[in-house]
Amino acid sequence: MSHESTAVSTETPAYPHLGEHGPMVDALVRSALDVFATMVALPLVAGVPTISDARPPANVIGTVGFAGSISGLVSFCGTRVASLEITAALLGSSVDAVAGDLPDAIGEVANMIAGSFRTKMSHSEDRWAITMPVVTIGEDFLQKYSSSAVRVICPLTMGTHQLFVELVLQPA
Amino acid sequence: MRVLIVDDSSTMRRIIANTLKKLGYDDVVEAGDGTEGLQKVAQGKPGLILTDWNMPKMDGREFVKTLRTQSGMEAVPVLMVTTHAERTDVVLALQAGVNDYVVKPFTPETLKEKIEALLGKTAA
């Protein structure tokens, strides 16, 4: 699997190639950028999202479900090394000291991204709810969704690390 | 002054505690849900409480509602720190007895300003 790594504007990314899903993906990417700018304080650059069934190359995945007029999942995906750096940055600690904190920290990152995404998508006549975060850590697993689900992979670059946010939409 | 942090995320408790320490508040007590938060209050009255909304056992709104019925806790400043950002959410939190509201994600400066405004001071 390959992902285009050419950065697009992190201010107002727009994804016309995603059609009707573009605004929702834009809201998700901006949510991830907001979380990193305010809470993690590590530079993050957004790449070009693609509709894809391929699994992002990640072994730490924080997932939060959402439900409103549209339902689905938001996942934050990274390698263990990148996830440790994020955890250390969040906690103001060193990478060597945070291994035990990684699941909760990545869960909180996923929770904040999904919460910010919900705020951007929700309005008074379409109230969205999100689930508690679930963190999956491992080397050899597959995440499978229903065949009708639409899956958008959004690459993000943090220094030398490739991260992803994933949006899985379940048709009504 | 004792500060109580109520949040089911140990990460968020650490982030908030780190900010409080930078502000000079070293007497920080933590709880993982509203029920534990009430137990901590019973063990020693805090001068400031920061609480999440979504938590197991007892959520932040129920925690604050119960807190406000307890003698001596009617006026303790409570800051809600949550991903709930809609206007109706803020209204519900204020109705429960919350004094002010911070939406995640937040900058340390935002949290600092909210705390200082709640405590009516510019430095710890």
Image (cartoon, helix red, strand yellow):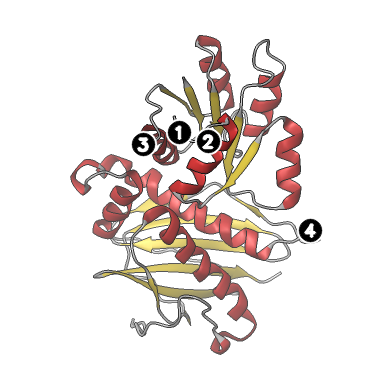
Q: Which residue is mark 1?
A: B123
In the picture provided, is A68 more to the left or to the right than A107? right
- Relative to A121, residue A6 above or below: below
Q: Which residue is mark 3?
A: B22
Circles 2 and 4 on the same chain: no
Q: CA distance from mark 1 to mark 4?
A: 38 Å
Circles 2 and 1 on the same chain: yes
The answer to whether residue A108 is visible is yes
Res A99 → quadrant: top left
Q: CA distance from mark 3 to mark 1?
A: 10 Å
Residue at 53% of width from left, 36% of height from top? B115
The circle on residue A124 is 4
**Are discs 3 and 2 less than 8 Å apart at CB?**
no
Residue at 48% of width from left, 56% of height from top? A63
Q: Tell me residue A129's x, y (percent).
A: 66, 53
Q: Count every numbered label the image shows and give the total.
A: 4
Helix, strand or loop at mark 2: helix
Amino acid type shown at disc 2: Glu
